[in-house]
Image (cartoon, grey):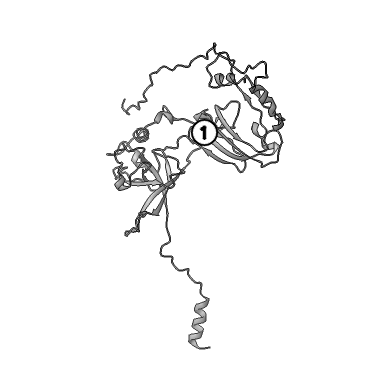
C-alpha cells in the first residue's frame, strides 16, 4: 500500500460533516413582548405600504434586558413589528403579553422578490399564568435597575405597571381595578383537544372517559357506549374565578342545565335534557310564543327513548295532546322586554401622584 493510498484510506475513515444547505430557513426568531396592536385602520401607525396592517403587533425582544441603570428606558427603539402567522387561526394578543416570533420569507404573489425579503410573524400567546383571560406583564425582561426611582431617567414600579393598561382599549373586560379578571376554564380529561377563548367560550373534542374518571361530568355518565366514544361540546359561560383563590375556583365542567347556551354533538352518549318553556303568556321568553303556536308546553328527553318514539312528538304537534292546544291564545300577549339606556362608568386609571 503506497503512502497516497494509505492517506486516502485514513481520510475516508474520518467523520464526515454534512454539507451546508444554502437556503435552509431559520424561521424561529424568539419571544416578543407585545407593545401595541393595530386593531383597525384608525390606528396612527396603520400603513399598508409598510406592511403595517390590521393585526400587526409592535414588539420588543422579551429575552434581553432593557439596558442598565445608565441607559434611558426607550420601549419604541427598533420599532419591530410582526403580522399574524396564520390569519385563519389566530389569537389577538394584548399589550404586555408575550408571543412566539417567527421569521419567514415574503414575496409578491405575482412574481419573485428580487431582494429575497424576510418579515416577522407572530404565533401563539405565551401562557405565563393559568389565566386565559389576560397574561399581560409589564416587567418582562426589564433590568431591575430601571425600577430605581432615585436615579435620573428611571421609573417607579407603579409607572411601569400602568403603561400597558393605558394601551388596552377595552381594559374593563380584562381587569377589575388592579386585579386581572379570571374566567373559569374547563377541567381536563386525558386526550382532550380544547379550544378555549378568553371570556368563557369553549369547544371540547373529547371521548367518553371510564367511570372512575367522570369527575362530575354529566355527559360522561350512563355507561351506554365504550370508553373513548367521541363527543364534541360547545358552550358559553361567563362564570368567573377568584383571582386570590385560583386553585379552588378556576376549573369547572360543562353543565347542560346551567350553562347559558350549549351545543353537544354525541355518538353513544345519552344525555337527559329538559327544555325550559314558560307558561303561555306569563314570561317574555324567545320560545314562549313559538312553542305555544305549535302546541308544545314541555318536553323532557328520556335516556331510554329511541327513534321509534318520534310519534310522541308528532301527536303534540298535531294537537292530540289536550294539555297543549295547537293554537295559542292570541288574546294573551307575552310581556315585552324593554331596555333603557343606563349610564356606564368610565374606567379611569389615576396618575401615580393622584
Q: Is residue 13 visible?
A: yes
Q: Extreme top residue here?
A: 331
Q: Quadrant of residue 209?
A: top right
Q: Is residue 64 above or below residue 161?
A: below
Front-most of 198 and 149? 198
Q: Residue at x 53, y 21 (%)?
A: 286
Front-most of 3 and 57? 57
Q: Position of residue 151 (x, y in %)?
A: 29, 39
Q: Is residue 242 above or below residue 148?
A: above
Q: Is residue 215 visible?
A: no
Front-most of 308 and 107? 308
Front-most of 143 and 101? 101
Q: Quadrant of residue 68?
A: top left
Report helix, strand or loop for mark 1. strand
User: Dot 1, crowdedness within 10 Å: few (<14), some or many (≥20)?
Assistant: some
Q: Residue at x 32, y 38 (%)?
A: 41
The residue under label 1 is: 201
Q: Position of residue 61 (x, y in %)?
A: 38, 47
Residue 3 as seen in the image, left or right of residue 327: left
Q: Position of residue 116 (x, y in %)?
A: 34, 58
Amino acid at each position: 500500500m503506497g503512502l497516497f493510498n494509505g492517506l486516502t484510506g485514513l481520510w475516508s475513515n474520518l467523520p464526515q460533516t454534512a454539507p451546508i444547505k444554502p437556503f435552509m430557513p431559520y424561521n424561529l426568531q424568539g419571544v416578543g413582548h407585545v407593545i401595541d396592536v393595530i386593531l383597525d385602520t384608525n390606528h396612527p401607525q396603520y400603513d399598508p405600504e409598510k406592511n403595517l396592517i390590521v393585526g400587526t403587533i409592535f414588539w420588543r425582544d422579551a429575552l434581553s434586558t432593557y439596558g442598565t441603570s445608565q441607559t434611558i428606558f426607550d420601549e419604541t427603539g427598533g420599532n419591530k413589528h410582526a403580522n399574524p402567522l396564520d390569519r385563519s387561526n389566530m389569537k389577538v394578543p394584548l399589550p404586555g403579553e408575550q408571543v412566539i416570533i417567527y421569521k419567514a420569507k415574503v414575496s409578491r404573489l405575482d412574481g419573485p422578490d428580487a431582494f429575497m425579503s424576510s418579515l416577522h410573524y407572530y404565533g401563539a400567546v405565551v401562557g405565563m399564568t393559568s389565566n386565559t383571560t389576560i397574561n399581560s406583564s409589564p416587567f418582562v425582561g426589564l433590568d431591575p435597575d430601571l425600577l430605581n426611582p432615585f436615579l435620573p431617567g428611571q421609573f417607579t414600579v407603579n409607572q411601569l405597571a400602568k403603561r400597558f393598561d393605558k394601551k388596552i382599549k377595552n381594559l374593563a373586560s380584562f381587569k377589575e381595578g388592579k386585579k386581572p379578571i379570571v374566567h373559569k376554564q374547563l377541567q381536563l380529561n386525558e386526550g382532550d383537544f380544547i379550544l378555549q377563548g378568553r371570556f368563557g367560550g369553549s369547544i371540547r373534542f373529547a371521548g367518553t372517559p371510564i367511570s372512575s374518571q367522570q369527575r362530575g361530568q354529566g355527559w360522561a355518565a350512563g355507561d351506554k357506549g365504550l370508553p373513548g366514544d367521541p363527543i364534541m361540546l360547545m358552550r358559553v359561560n361567563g362564570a368567573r374565578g377568584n383571582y386570590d383563590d385560583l386553585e379552588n375556583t378556576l376549573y369547572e365542567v360543562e353543565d347542560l342545565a346551567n350553562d347559558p347556551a350549549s351545543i353537544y354533538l354525541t355518538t353513544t352518549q345519552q344525555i337527559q335534557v329538559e327544555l325550559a318553556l314558560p307558561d303561555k303568556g306569563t314570561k317574555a321568553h324567545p320560545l314562549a310564543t313559538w312553542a305555544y303556536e305549535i302546541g308544545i308546553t314541555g318536553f323532557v328527553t328520556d335516556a331510554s327513548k329511541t327513534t321509534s318514539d318520534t310519534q310522541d312528538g308528532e301527536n303534540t304537534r298535531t294537537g292530540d295532546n289536550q294539555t297543549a292546544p295547537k293554537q295559542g291564545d292570541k288574546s294573551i300577549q307575552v310581556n315585552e322586554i324593554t331596555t333603557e339606556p343606563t349610564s356606564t362608568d368610565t374606567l379611569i386609571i389615576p396618575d401615580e401622584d393622584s
